[in-house]
Image (spheres, rainbow, N blue to C red):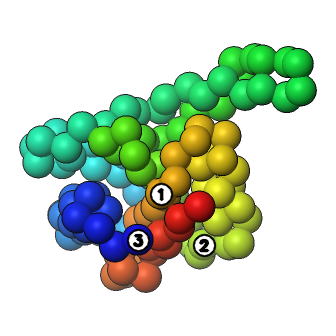
Amino acid sequence: MPDSLTREIIGAAIEVHKHLGPGLLESIYEECLCHELELRGILFERQKPIEISYKDLRAAFDFRIDLIVDNSVVVELKAVKELHPIYEAQLLTYMKLSGYKKGLIINFNVPLLKDGLKRMVL
């Protein structure tokens, strides 16, 4: 999956991490990553609500994806001690429900951001 868009997203995240380091709240990293994406001219939607359908029920639950970048990549942000397999399952579920084929988990709570990245493709 390493394409130019995911490289740009990761580059923006590295820039944020380089300036802030680990140990802050996820909401702070989200705000700063969105600002960095704007500075780079990369389009995104933040906290996008997704309608979930189950059989004949269609409902707008309080389900939001952290970021959808350039209408093609789901980005799930974390600020946790370690990435557990449940986070990968969460991202895959978000991708399936939203119809997007590419996803990134970015965990900012690591000394080196490369150790907090996970790319996924459906």
Residue placed under numbered mark 2 in the picture: 83
> Marks 1 and 2, Cα distance to the nearest angstrom?
18 Å
Q: Choose the circle earlier in sequence order: 3 or 1.
A: 3
Q: Are marks 1 and 2 in contact (CB under 8 Å)?
A: no
Residue 106, above or below 43: below
Q: Are marks 3 and 1 in contact (CB under 8 Å)?
A: yes
- Bin the neighbour count of mark 3 within 10 Å (Cα to Cα): few under 14, some 14-19, many 20 and up: few
Left or right: 74 in relation to 113: right
Q: At numbered mark 3, what does the secondary structure look like: helix, strand or loop?
A: loop
For the N terminus, the image quarter is bottom left
Which residue lies at the image location 47% right of the left edge and 70% below the top edge? 119
Which residue lies at the image location 78% right of the left edge and 17% below the top edge? 58
Left or right: 16 in relation to 60: left
The quadrant in which residue 34 appears is top left
What's the amino acid at mark 2?
Leu
> Marks 2 and 3, Cα distance to the nearest angstrom?
20 Å
Residue 102, numbered circle: 1
Question: Where in the figure is residue 67, as x and y percent of width and height?
Answer: 42, 42
Residue placed under numbered mark 3 in the picture: 1
> Marks 3 and 1, Cα distance to the nearest angstrom?
8 Å
Question: Where in the figure is residue 97, as x and y percent of width and height?
Answer: 67, 40
The quadrant in which residue 117 appears is bottom left
From the viewer's perspective, is the residue at label 1 or at label 2 nearer?
1
